[in-house]
Amino acid sequence: MCLLAVPFCLLLFLIDNFTIAVTVLFFYDLLCLGYYAPVMSMIQATVEPENKGAAIGAFGFVNNYTQALVSLLIGFLVQKYSLGDS
C-alpha cells in the first residue's frame, strides 16, 4: 500500500459530503491501487506455471487482509476519538 492510503481512508470515513468523498475515493483508487496490475504481471512473468495460482492467491489474500486491517484500525480510531456521528 502506498503512504497515501491511510490519509485517503481517513478522509473517506470523516467527510460528510458525498461528492467530496467520491472524489477522494477516485484519487485513492488512482494513486494507491495502481500497484495491482504490475504485481500481477510480475507474478505471471516470474513464477513457474505450476505455482502461479498459489502465488496469485497468496498475494490476493495478503492484499485483502491488509486492507481489512487498515479499515479496522480506522474504525477503532473513529470510535476512540468519537469522530463519527453519535
Image: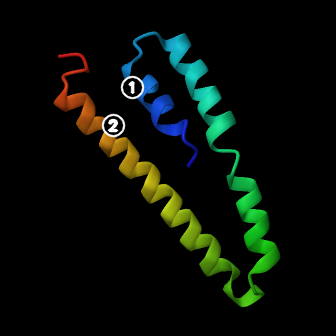
Q: Residue at 23% of width from left, 16% of height from top?
A: 85
Q: Residue at 40% of width from left, 50% of height from top?
A: 68
Instruction: Kindly check if marks 2 and 1 are in contact, taking CB atoms under 8 A apart as contact.
Output: yes
Position of 86 compared to 59: left or right? left
Relative to 4, residue 57 above or below: below
Disc 2 residue type? Ile
Q: How would you rate the neighbour count of disc 1 (Cα within 10 Å): few for under 14, some for 14-19, many for 20 or more?
A: some
Relative to 46, residue 60 above or below: above
Quarter the C terminus occupies: top left
Disc 1 residue type? Phe
Q: Position of residue 74 (x, y in %)?
A: 33, 37
Q: How is the image coloured?
A: rainbow
Relative to 48, residue 66 above or below: above
Residue at numbered disc 1: 13
Q: How would you rate the neighbour count of disc 2 (Cα within 10 Å): few for under 14, some for 14-19, many for 20 or more?
A: some
User: Which label sits on residue 21?
Assistant: none
Separation of residues labelled 2 and 1 (CA atoms): 8 Å
Q: Position of residue 75 (x, y in %)?
A: 29, 36
Residue at numbered disc 2: 74
Q: Position of residue 27 (x, y in %)?
A: 64, 28
